[in-house]
Amino acid sequence: MVIETRPDAATVRDWLAEVPDPEIPVISVTDLGIVRDVGWEDDTLVVGVTPTYSGCPAVAVIELEIDAHLRAKGVESVRVERRLSPPWSTDWLTEEAREKLRGYGIAPPVDGTAGDVGSLRAVRMGGAEVAVACPRCASTKTQMVSRHGSTPCKAAYRCGDCLEPFDYFKCI
């Protein structure tokens, strides 16, 4: 199938909302906020993508999936460009993505926090400790078990109330 007319940016973004993140398939690349811009250069559809971090092991897969999905929609010429500046931030996650993460059992990032390298805790910029809410029972009686979770962008946590382990999407 080849499209007759060029889709506008809104249509392309709608199509990209169908492309799941390979590490967290419940959210799309647009939910994740990594699709920076969409536009046409002559007859080529150019999609700018910023990886969640420069060493993300899924970025090549994401780029291939975007290309394949747009070609399946009938776009003949696609170029996916990696944009490293400005760097991606968890602030770019949509509110819908945060809800989808919770529903999937992953605690979304607490804005303005970062992992304290010296200890197993989440801290607000400036040093105040922050409780990460359990995505299953919403308890804030949680504890970081490891700064390293199931993927590099997550940390492993445990809930003190429901006793379930869960991943926390690190704030970047």
Image: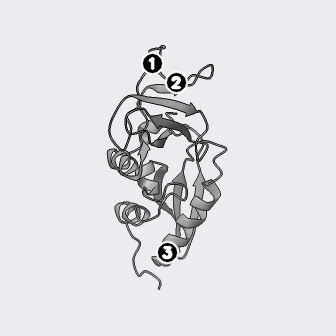
Judge whether 172 appears above or below 68 on screen: above
Say whether marks 2 and 3 touch (CB < 8 Å). Answer: no
Say whether marks 2 and 1 touch (CB < 8 Å). Answer: yes
Foreground label between 3 and 1: 1
Which numbered disc flags the more N-terminal residue, 2 or 1? Answer: 2
Which residue carries the number 1 mark? 129
Which residue carries the number 2 mark? 121
Q: Name the one closer to the observer, 162 or 39.
A: 162
* Residue 49 screen position, x and y as percent: 54, 52
Q: CA distance from mark 2 to mark 3?
A: 46 Å
Q: CA distance from mark 2 to mark 1?
A: 7 Å
Foreground label between 2 and 3: 2
* Residue 3 screen position, x and y as percent: 43, 80
Question: In the structure shown, which secondary structural element does the residue marked by tag 2 occupy?
Answer: loop
Which numbered disc flags the more N-terminal residue, 3 or 1? Answer: 3
Residue 75: mark in rendering? 3
Q: CA distance from mark 3 to mark 1?
A: 48 Å
Image quadrant where residue 18 sits: bottom left
Mark 2, residues whose alpha carbon is within 10 Å: few (<14), some, or many (≥20)? many
- Colour scheme in the image? one colour
Q: Name the one closer to the observer, 133 or 172.
A: 133
